[in-house]
Amino acid sequence: KLQNLLQGLSFSFRYYSKHNHLQTVGLYSKIKEKNCHTLDCSGGTCTHRTVPPGSILPWRFFSCKEGTKIPFKRKQNTSIISELLYKNLLKSEQENWNDISSRYKAMTKRIKKKLQELHSYTFNLESPRIRIGGNVYFEENGCVFLSKADDVDEGNVDIVFSTEDLGFSDAFIQRIRISPDQRYMAVSLKSENSEEATCVIMKLGHFPVVEKVIPNVFSFEWATNDVLYYTSQKNLKCQNVFMTTFTNQKHTKLVYTEPDTRFFVDIYCTKDRRFLTINSNSKTTSEVWLVDCRHPFKLPALVQARTKGVIYHIEHRNDELYILTTYGEPAEYKLMKAPVASSGMENWQLVYALEEKTKLVDLEMFSDRCIMFLKNAGHLYLNVISFVSHSVQSIKLPAWACEFGLESHPEHTTSTCYFQLTSPVHPPKRFAYSFKENNLIEQAVQEVPIITNCQTTRLLAKSKDETLVPITVFHNMNSKELHRKPLLVHVYGAYGIDLNMSFKEEKMMLIEEGWILAYCHVRGGGELGLSWHKDGCQQNKLKGLHDLKACIMLLHELGFSQPKYTALAAASAGGVLAGALCNTDPELIRAMVLQAPFVDVLNTMMKTHLPLTTEEQEEWGNPLADEKCMKYIKSYCPYQNIKTQCYPSVFITAYENDQRIPLTGVLRYVQKLRKAALDHASRTSKKGNRIPNIILHIQATGSHCDSPWEDSLNE
């Protein structure tokens, strides 16, 4: 699966997925109520996803790591703020938060009750099931169950794995891989406060037993019945691949090491189980090695040596490699193929090229065709490519849909492709595409409170350089005087990642209460393909800021709310553009909500000892080596550009154990912002200017990883 492959590529991004109750990444099936993660089941595998919906970059993505809790490295990250000051700031912020949050108890109670009611309707879905031969595996509440296919609905099931019984009661199941002969099952476990996962290998049978426990594992796949390949993870990096055997002579061997710290390594099994691919990727370049599953002890074979600026991913069919790549012009994704025996770039033949400004969300390979899941001009499409007739059929999906969710297809010979469609205000709805009937089928689903009176509008805002920037707007069509309604604007604009537009109960609630929701698909994101990202990163980062300003101004001009009723929401790297707009055009919004925000770009990118700095240079530039780059980052960095003026009110959530966004940078930002706001108020007090609320909520637990439903609800 493309999105399986891409999980490594996006893992190191500063992307926040705390509230993505529906996450779209590759072959995922149903939504899990307990942990609000999606479970990916492909070819006898099952994986909890933590990648943003619609993203074509899910490898290094936030498949956040789990296992042991990572202590906050205070001495390493507090070179500017002394240890004593740091502790005092934490205590002061906590006291401030306790005082402020107590004022909202009544509102909190009302909102919590409403969200619980919506959640009970929208996420009462059964677990995804993995069918292998005559057996069915599924996961619920920290347990993996096994049943005969004919008995699964009768309740005749056996427990083959339990997190509680094995002493992992605070962890959730992230990924499952079952060996081809079903003798072994590998399960990765992750806790809420950690980025590392622990892999537990079970020997199945009448009495399943733990065969091996491997700490700090990111990805893993079975090459054969008793040979497992896995990647180890340390400080947000994966650079080593190991092979471990479960034969009579058990041993573990290092088979691959990536020397370049900008690259991240993960493993994927092709749909037909012919090869394991060792994928080494930076944010702009990739290299793939093949492990022949028929000869798992042979050295991996190189497909194509890395070429700067060329990304490629591999699938296999009928002794040919199918290569999804950016090779050639234009530098957008193309599907190409080459013989296994001569896989070099000089032998790549074009199969299909995407249209201009089209985003490839995912690709699913079947025995004689593949399906591309696409976005174009805000609409979703399927392109069905036949390898037999060499034809391409394009199917436009319902206009309300904003995100895909793929379901599991254990057999690549299946005749039906299942997937779900969703939007911020539409719970997931199940569809199927039948290869035999050549048509799209809407599946019967449970009754959920679908909002029938929600209007979806797609707009284009003209940016400073005349570029048209898409906006998706949702509002209650019965609302009158929209210019008086509150507006919540969303932005991200980094790493080529789309804005998360999956369903969330709180969005449905806001629509019901008269709010307008707007999603600004600015440059730096990936909504219009790879060029859209390239046009908004490094020396083009300011274009994303200009796009955001143009979007908000157009919304107001068209009568969607007004500045005094407008709030801006962003998370992680989205905090760069949101924080920058706060400095340049604070009059456009009244409030800003940031979650684990990246607001101290320059200082962070100057610290090479931090785990992501080197890798992130392809997104932000290298200020240590390039003075021009340093000046450019300084021109938009939220922290660097705070000035004495009237700011909107700001609410920030941050996490002590967050390895991706150093807490010290957030603390510096809040202190400087408060001082600027107070200085402005003191100078203009006679004019009656308001003093904005600048609130910081620091959570001792939690991180960039997903939260269980209850924690997410409380936040």
Image: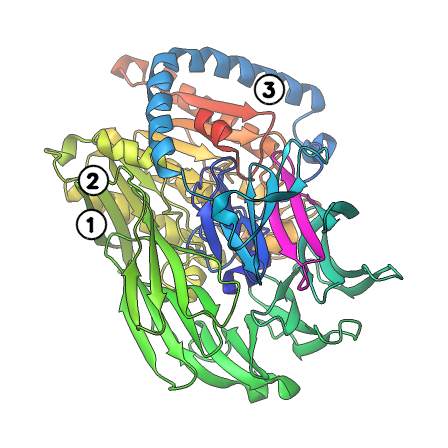
Marks 3 and 2 sit apart, C-alpha to C-alpha, by: 40 Å
Indicate the position of residue 228 as horizontal and vertical percent values: 74, 60
Amino acid type, callout 1: Thr
Q: Nearer the viewer, mark 3 or mark 2?
A: 2
Q: In the rendered structure, which disc, 1 or 3, sits on the residue that comes first in sequence?
A: 3
Q: Mark 1 near mark 3, Cβ–Cβ under 8 Å? A: no
Q: In the rendered structure, which disc, 2 or 1, sits on the residue that comes first in sequence?
A: 1
Q: Is residue 455 left or right of residue 382?
A: left
Region of the chain picked out in magenta, as a range: 173-198
Quickly name the residue at label 3: 89
Q: Is residue 536 left or right of residue 224?
A: left
Q: Nearer the viewer, residue 437 or 323?
A: 437
Tag 1, which secondary structure?
strand
Quickly name the residue at label 2: 475
Residue 195 inside the magenta-drawn segment: yes
Quickly name the residue at label 1: 457
Amino acid type, callout 3: Leu
Indicate the position of residue 481 as horizontal and vertical percent values: 10, 33
Q: Badge 2 local density, few (<14 within 10 Å), some, or many (20+)?
A: many
Q: Which image quarter: residue 71?
A: top right
- Residue 463 seen by the camera: no
Q: Badge 1 local density, few (<14 within 10 Å), some, or many (20+)?
A: few
Q: In the rendered image of this protein, does residue 195 appear above or below residue 673?
A: below
Marks 1 and 3 sit apart, C-alpha to C-alpha, by: 44 Å
Which disc number belongs to residue 366? Answer: none
Tag 2, which secondary structure?
strand
Indicate the position of residue 634 as horizontal and vertical percent values: 51, 45
